[in-house]
Amino acid sequence: MIIAEQGFTYAAIPPETAIAVRPALGQLVAGILTAVKAENPIYAEVLSGPEGMGIRLGIEQAVKSFLEAIERGERPAGETAEAWQRLGEAEFQAGRSLETLRAAWRTGTRAAWRGAAELGAAAGVPTPIVIALAEAIFVYTDELGTDVVEGYLRIQSDEAGERERRRRRLASLLLETVAGAHDPEAIARAAELARWPVPHALALLVFAGDTPGALTRRLDLDVLAGADRDGAWIVIPDPDGPGRRAGLGRAAAGTVCALGPTVTPHDAHRSLRWARLALALIGGGAIPSEHPTRVADHLETVIVRQDDELAAALAARALAPLEALAKTERERLLETLAAWLAHQRHTPGIAAELHVHPQTVRYRVAKLRELFGDTLGSPDGRFELELALRARQAPDE
């Protein structure tokens, strides 16, 4: 901040003003501390303990530098900037919020102005000079406050970067797939450094895209997030806990994503692998996008479609009797076969699902019996047909 740009110079205040205030330095500092404690309960305890001594000394030094600047007619020396930046760092490390710090700073500034104005008026300082003194105080405290906030944000950024690095390290340990590489003790140490307690159960959420940032911010959870060459992922702790399903649904609304099965930390890499398989199946139309799609709700399809070549071979063999039909008739009979299997051959239920007359269902089922023969009457045959329908590529592929 350049004071000249604000139309103010310390030379505008006679040195006698500082001389009038200096004898009451202790009184002025005490007034500032009293006001801060009264208006900011968080700092009442801080300023009454050992931490308070350092803050008091800092305020005393700031007031002395301010008065000396007035006596010289120059702006205060800048060598105290680092000290105030360290104060900002200390406030962050103590766990106090930036808004709480700013509120206390505003209180201190008002108290400094009131105290200086009262001392100046008592010493007979003319009103225009008292006004100039007020402007000088606000300019000076604004400069110091900028230093404090800079220190706070600097350490906050450093801490955030370090925490993110530690969390990436923890995630890499959790997702390690090398046989025998899962080291519970190493994971526990990494989790402590990352400030992320390893849950008893977790699941991996994956989605299209290379950054998990937006979705992570919408989650009301402390999660691990990252990405590798196969895409982005988020480690969800205790995914079956109270309210988690609804919370995930809100956060993932409109996002194509898949949630792997709930596993122990030891099997985190398996949840990731299954979630990615499900995400690929969503893209291929084999399972629906449910924001998120849960692998646990589609295990049969995911299992059958783990190997697309084998799935295609199964579908081709089991559904071969339909291949000679025209596409429209083939799709109609496939739809009827799926409903027939799902409703356990209950004609009214099949008709209701397909929105056709029961007689139409009977006609189509007769056609299926003609094509598939004894397969429809055999439990093994029906099981194979169910697998084939799940393994079959989507109609538009």
Image: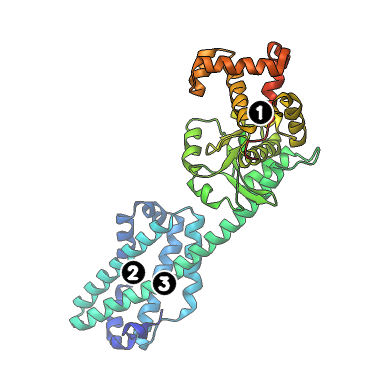
Observer-nearest of 300 and 227: 300
C-alpha distance separating marks 3 and 1: 68 Å
Q: How packed is label 2: few (under 14 Cα within 10 Å), some, or many (20 or more)?
A: few
Name the image quarter holding residue 239: top right
**Residue for point 29% across, 77% down:** 135
Q: Secondary structure at mark 1?
A: helix
Q: To which residue does mark 2 refer? A: 26
Residue 245 horizontal/vertical position (percent): 50, 33
Instruction: Please state which of the two labelled residues, at mark 3 or mark 1, is closer to the viewer.
Output: 1
Tell me if mark 1 has few (under 14), some (14-19) or many (20+) residues whose alpha carbon lies within 10 angstroms of its own: many
Q: Which residue is mark 3?
A: 144
Q: Residue at x 59, y 13 (%)?
A: 345
Residue 142 numbered mark, or none? none
Q: How far apart in space, not on screen, are marks 3 and 2 (Cα)? A: 20 Å
Residue 27 shows in the view = no
Residue 103 at what x, y percent from top left?
Answer: 35, 60
